[in-house]
Image (spheres, grey):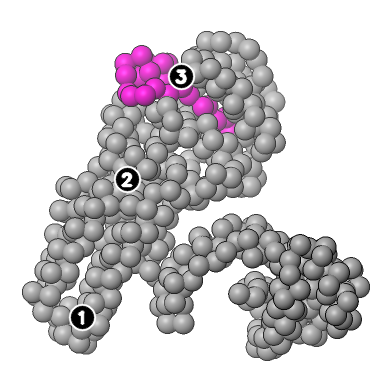
């Protein structure tokens, strides 16, 4: 996400940092480039004007130009202002002091509202909450059934009643939640192709009946300023408490993400970054600013790792590394953990593009290669996975046939595995923590 904007701004700031002395003329030229990059990313023109003006005002200060590293000072100013533009700090979901908390999901038709409702329910589950779902979309064919399919996929209960009136369905679900002990009710409301009075009247009634703790707008990031405009319309009528931008993984420009907070004064709380139900991220303005500027988002990467890496298994793996007992079975387990973290290109995008990491921009990871590696290891016997030294020529041919990969790939895997073992042993000797320093895989 935000690839084109990120590369443009990083290029401009790289030139600034390379200058021993930054002149006012050089700064103005850089600001023109940044302004153009933001406009091409479909950021609201008023937001662009204010942003560039604030950066210039601070960058022209005497303390910046007299600094030994004026280029780096300006990068810091851009990062701080970008963070402010994105909302400053993350705004968490609010929950009622007395359960249940009601979350009203609103948005236009086609914005991904039903899928996002499922993603949010799945996220709430991981936070230890007990969500319950209800659809009040009685107009779109199979909309209620669609939410039931989503609910089954994430193992969350949903209102099964066939009542066909929207407000009554919301009221019935709230009563059921109160009687059964669930602590969050997510209401997936109907959408329209555009904001209209009938839609707003119905949402007003549901809001009045359920007294929601949160009213979240689901907006399609790929629609750019249209998403911002619809957010303004919904906010004016319903007083939104937050926005979820869906389909951010398909939006290389990012205009909606950069504009929505400033234009609507409504915080961006989550972003959808994929099709799976766990592809929903809490929106952290400072982390997103870091990603845009190539500074990485290591905190989010660590949080993802903590979700999928079992601490006890990690300690066991560390002991094996120290004793040089790391096997092909362990290697396959790590590959599977790596896949659970998500697409590798997104993980690499969270790493800083500086120092030894600066070549990651050119690195293209073929996800199929990981599948091939796993297929090769899975074609080995348990004894072979436990002791790679017994894998001779005839065994390699059998493994090749079983995995459908050429013998050359089997040979390459074994060679790289031996190199990885040596490297992991060296790393583990200098590692004093309890968790693994990272997942290692051949490339």
Q: Is residue 421 at all visible to an observer of this figure?
A: no
Residue 430 lies in the magenta-colored region: no
Q: CA distance from mark 3 to mark 2?
A: 27 Å
- Tell me the mark number nearer the camera, choosing from 3 and 1: 1
Mark toward the start of the polypeptide (3 vs 2): 3
Residue shown at 72%/76% (left/top)? Answer: 408
Q: Are marks 2 and 1 in contact (CB under 8 Å)?
A: no
Q: Which residue is mark 1?
A: 70
Looking at the image, is mark 3 or mark 2 nearer the viewer? 2
Residue 37 left/right relative to 66: right
* Residue drawn 57% across the image and 29% down it: 185
Which class describes the residues within 10 Å of circle 1: few (<14), some (14-19), or many (20+)?
many
Residue placed most toward the observer, 75 or 143: 143
Residue at figure coordinates x 56%, y 58% from the top left:
343
Q: Which mark is residue 256?
A: 2
- The kind of secondary structure element at disc 1 is helix
Percent position (x, y) of residue 426?
Answer: 68, 89
Span highlighted in magenta in the image? 183-209
Q: Secondary structure at mark 3?
A: helix
Q: Quadrant of the C terminus?
A: bottom right
- Give the mark, 3 or 1, whose residue is nearer the N terminus: 1
The percent coordinates of residue 52 (x first, y second) are 17, 60
Q: Circle 2: is it few (<14), some (14-19), or many (20+) Cα within 10 Å?
A: many
- Disc 3 marks which residue? 206
Q: In front: 389, or 131? A: 389
* Mark 3 to mark 1 CA distance (whole Å): 55 Å
Is residue 208 or residue 222 the one in the foreground?
Answer: 222
Quarter of image, res 234:
top left
């Amino acid at each position: 996400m935000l690839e084109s904007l990120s590369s443009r701004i990083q290029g401009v700031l790289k030139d600034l940092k390379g200058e021993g002395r930054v002149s006012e003329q050089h700064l103005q030229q850089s600001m023109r480039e940044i302004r153009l990059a933001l406009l091409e990313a479909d950021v609201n023109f008023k937001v662009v004007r204010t942003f560039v003006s604030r950066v210039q005002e601070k960058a022209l200060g005497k303390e910046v130009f007299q600094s030994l590293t004026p280029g780096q000072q300006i990068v810091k100013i851009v990062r701080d202002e970008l963070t402010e533009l994105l909302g400053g700090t993350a705004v968490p979901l609010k929950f009622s002091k007395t359960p249940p908390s009601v979350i009203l999901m609103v948005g236009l038709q086609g914005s991904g509202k039903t899928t996002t409702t499922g993603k949010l329910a799945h996220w709430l589950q991981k936070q230890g909450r007990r969500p319950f779902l209800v659809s009040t979309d009685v107009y779109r064919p199979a909309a209620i059934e669609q939410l039931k399919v989503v609910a089954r996929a994430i193992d969350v209960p949903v209102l099964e009643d066939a009542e066909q009136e929207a407000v009554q369905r919301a009221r019935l679900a709230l009563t059921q939640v109160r009687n059964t002990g669930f602590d969050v009710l997510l209401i997936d409301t109907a959408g329209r192709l555009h904001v209209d009075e009938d839609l707003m009247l119905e949402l007003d009634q549901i809001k009045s009946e359920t007294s929601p703790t949160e009213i979240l707008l689901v907006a399609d990031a790929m629609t750019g300023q249209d998403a911002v405009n619809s957010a303004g319309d919904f906010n004016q009528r319903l007083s939104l408490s937050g926005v979820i931008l869906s389909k951010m993984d398909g939006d290389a420009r990012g205009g909606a993400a950069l504009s929505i907070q400033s234009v609507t004064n409504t915080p961006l709380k989550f972003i959808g970054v994929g099709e799976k139900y766990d592809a929903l991220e809490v929106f952290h303005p400072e982390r997103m600013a870091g990603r845009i500027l190539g500074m990485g988002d290591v905190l989010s990467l660590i949080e993802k790792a903590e979700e999928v890496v079992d601490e006890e298994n990690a300690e066991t793996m560390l002991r094996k590394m120290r004793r040089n007992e790391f096997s092909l079975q362990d290697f396959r387990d790590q590959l599977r953990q790596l896949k659970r973290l998500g697409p590798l290109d997104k993980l690499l995008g969270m790493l800083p593009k500086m120092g030894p990491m600066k070549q990651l921009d050119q690195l293209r990871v073929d996800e199929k290669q990981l599948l091939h590696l796993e297929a090769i290891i899975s074609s080995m016997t348990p004894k072979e996975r436990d002791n790679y030294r017994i894998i001779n020529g005839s065994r390699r041919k059998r493994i090749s046939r079983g995995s459908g990969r050429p013998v050359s790939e089997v040979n390459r895997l074994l060679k790289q595995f031996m190199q990885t073992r040596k490297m992991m042993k060296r790393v583990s000797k200098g590692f004093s923590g309890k968790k693994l320093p990272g997942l290692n895989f051949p490339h």
